Image (tube, rainbow, N blue to C red):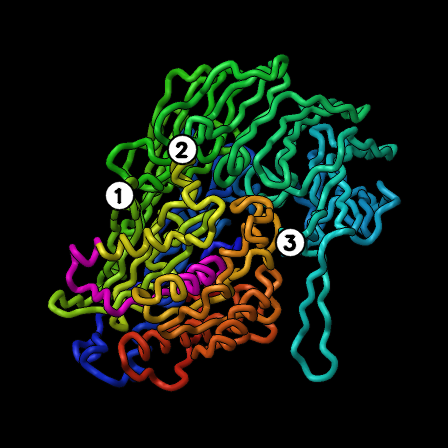
Amino acid sequence: MKNTPILYTAFIFVFAAHSIFAQSTSVFTAADYARAEKMLSYNTAPLVDRNGVRPTFLPDGRFWYRVLTPTGSEYVLINPTDGSRTVGDSLARIGVTGSGAPTGPARFGGGGGNAITSPDGKKAAFIREYDLWVRDVASGRETQLTTDGIKDYGYATDNAGWKKSERPILLWSPDSRKIATFRQDQRAVSDMYLVTTNVGAPKLEAWKYPLPTDKRIIVIERVIIEVDRPKLIQLNIPPDARRGTLCDDISCSGGFDDNEWSPDGSKLAFVSSSRDHKQAKFRIADAATGNVREVFEEVVPTQYESGQGAVNWKYLPETNEAIWYSERDDWGHLYLYDLRTGKPKNQITKGNFVVTQLLKMDTANRVLYFEANGKEAGRDPYFSHLYRIDFDGRNLKLLTPEDGHHQVTISPDGRYFIDNYSKPDVPTTAVLRDTTGKEIASLEKGDVSRLVAAGWKPPTPITVKSRDGKWDLYGLMFTPTNLDRAKKYPVINYIYPGPQGGGVGTRAFGPSRNDNQALAELGFVVVVIDGTCNPDRSKSFHDVCYGNMADNTLEDQIAGMKQLAAKHPYLDLDRVGVWGHSGGGYATAAAMFRYPDFYKVGISESGNHENRNYEDDWGERYIGLLTATADGKDNYEAQANQIYAKNLKGKLLLAHGNMDNNVPPYNTWLVVDALTKANKDYDLIIFPNARHGYGGDSFYMMRRRWDYFVKNLLGANPPKEYKLVSKPDPRLAPGQ
C-alpha cells in the first residue's frame, strides 16, 4: 500500500489497420502483443534524447552531468559563473578526474553499506547485535556505544512493520561528538509470519508487524549518545509512538526525520507525533542533561503532516525561532514561531496554494526558498514551482515562471539552481538560474523527434468535476494511436487512490506510464484520475475520505468517466474495467463489489483489503484508532472488502505475492475465502516467493493483465503465453 504505483516507460507505435481494434477480430496474435510491447519502457526510453539534467557538483562550484543522445552519452561541464560549457564523450575529455561530490545535499550521512558517517568524516556508526557501535574510519578501531540492546528492544533499528534494514536511524551532531537516536521497543506487538515455497522444509519468516488491533504498538525511547566517552543520556519524556510528521513511519527519508541539532550540539529540537497522528509536539532537549522543554503543539481532528516529500519545520536557535508547517487555514503553509513563548510571530506564506517543500533558508537575509503547488492560475494544480519569500511574509517571488512541473536542484553553495521543467505530454527543458530567478544558461531541451517519427503521441491531460461538482479533478487519458472516433472502445480505469498519492504520479514528462498506452493500443481507452482524498491540494480535499478508506475515490472515478464519455462518445461505459496494485488492488476489489453494475472486469493486485490486517501506522493515520461501534463491531469493519464479496457480478482476477512483507497475502486470502463461500467465480494468481511488487514475475503479471482484459472486455482470444522480455538501453552499454 505504501509503495507508489510501479511506473513503466513506454511509447506508441502505429499499428497496422487490420489489428488495431479488437472489435474487428476475435483472435489476437503474437504480432499484436509484440506491437504493444514496443510501448514498454525498455523499448521507449532509448528513443528519448537529452531529457533532463542530473547535476554532480564539484568543490569549486562547477557541475557536470551526463546526457543521452541518439548515439550514446555526452558529458557536459558547466561553469555557473558565466554559464560556459565544456562538452566531451567522457569525464576526462571535459577535465573531470573524479566523480565529484554527490548530487545535492545528503539527507543522511554516508559511510557505505549499513554505516552512517559523521559530518567530519572520521567516524561511522553502525548496528551490531541490537546495539550501536562506532568505527574510527582511519584506524578501523570499533567502540561499543550501548550495551543493553536485545532482540525486539534494540538501538537505532529500522526493522519495524514492513521495513527491514540494518542501516541505523540516527542523526549526528554538527561537531561529530553526539548522536541522536532511540531504543525501539516492539516486544509487545503482533508477529507476522510468511513461509517460503521450496523443495524440502519451508523456511519461516517471522518479524514484528503491529496492527490496529494491538493495544500496544512499537514505541521509541529517545536517547542522546556522547560518542567519545561514550555516555548515554535518556531524554526525560515517556516513550513516543513510532510515528513521523511526513509519512506514517518515523523514517521517511532514510534518516532520523523530525530531529535537528543546534549548531553547537548543545540542543536537540524534535517533534513527537501521537499514535493517531493527530497531535504533534515541538520539543527541545538539553543534550547534556536529557531535560526536555515542550515548546508548542498542534492538534488536528484528522491527521497532521509536515509537507510533501520533506519535513518542512526548521529549528533556528540563533534567533530563538522555528519555521513550522500547518494546514490550519485549509492550505499547507509556513509559519514563524517564537521559541521563547511558543507562539506564532507571523504566517509566512498565505493563499489558496500548498507549500510542499522548504528547500533552502537564507537566515542572514531572512529569506526562504520553497516549492509549492497550485498558486499559478490556469495551470495543473499539481505542477510544482519554486518561490522565494521573506521571513515576514513579504516579497513573494516566483522563480520558475514557465507553465509546467518544475524539479529543482539547488547548488551546495546556494547561489544557483538547476531547473528541469516539463509536462506529462511535453519533454523536459533544463536551465540554470540564479537565486533571483534570472536564467544564466540553457542546459538541455528534451528531444522526442525519434519518438514522433515512430508514431508516438502523448497522453491527453483531462479535467473533470468531482462527484459533488465541488472540485476540479485532473488526470490523463490514453487512446489508441489510430483512434477511430466512430468506434466504441472499452474503458480501463487504472486506479491508485492514495491517500498518500494518486494514480497519475509525477507530473514530469515520461514517454508513458505503467502499461497504459500498451493497453490502449490493444483496443482500449485507459483513464487515470486523481480523485479527492489525495495530498498536494487543500486539507479539506485530502480529508474527504478520512475515516473511510473504502471510499477509494470510486465515486469520483465514475463521475469523471461519465463526463469524459459525454464529451468523447467513443468511450463505451457499458464495458468498463479497472485495475490497480496495492492500494489500487484494494480499490479494484471495492469497485467490483460496491459498484458491480458499472465495473465489469477487475484485476486486483496485492490489495490491502482488510486494514485490520495491515500495518498499524497507515490505517491509524487515515482511518483513526480502532474503536468499537454501537453494533458491537468496530470502525474498520465496514471498510473490509471481504464483507462485500458476495456482490460480485463481473470477472475478477486477484493476484498476490506469497512473501509480501508489505501487504501480507492473507489480505487477499480473506477475499478469496469470502468469494468461495459466496459461490462466486473468480480467478487467482499466486506468486509463491514474490514480494509486494512481484520482482522478476512482474512482466508475467503484466501479460496476464493484457490477456484478462482482451478476453473479458473485448471478447477476443489473446495469443497463448506471449512472453515480455526486457532489454537494456543500448546507449548505456559498456563503452558508450
Viewer-closest of 615 and 42: 615
Residue 507's mark?
Answer: none
User: For the view shown, which residue lies furthest in the front direction?
Assistant: 631
Q: Which residues are magenta?
A: 563-590
User: For the view shown, which residue lies furthest in the left direction?
Assistant: 486
Disc 3 residue type (three-letter)? Leu
**Residue at left 57%, top 21%?**
322
Q: Which residue is mark 3?
A: 211
Disc 2 residue type (three-letter)? Val
Mark 3 or mark 2, whichever is nearer to me: 3
Q: Which residue is mark 1?
A: 469
State yes or no: residue 584 in magenta: yes
**Residue at left 55%, top 48%?**
630
Secondary structure, mark 2, is strand
Query: Cβ–Cβ below 8 Å for labels 2 and 1?
Result: no
Position of residue 668 measured from the top left corner of the image (x, y, whole percent): 53, 68
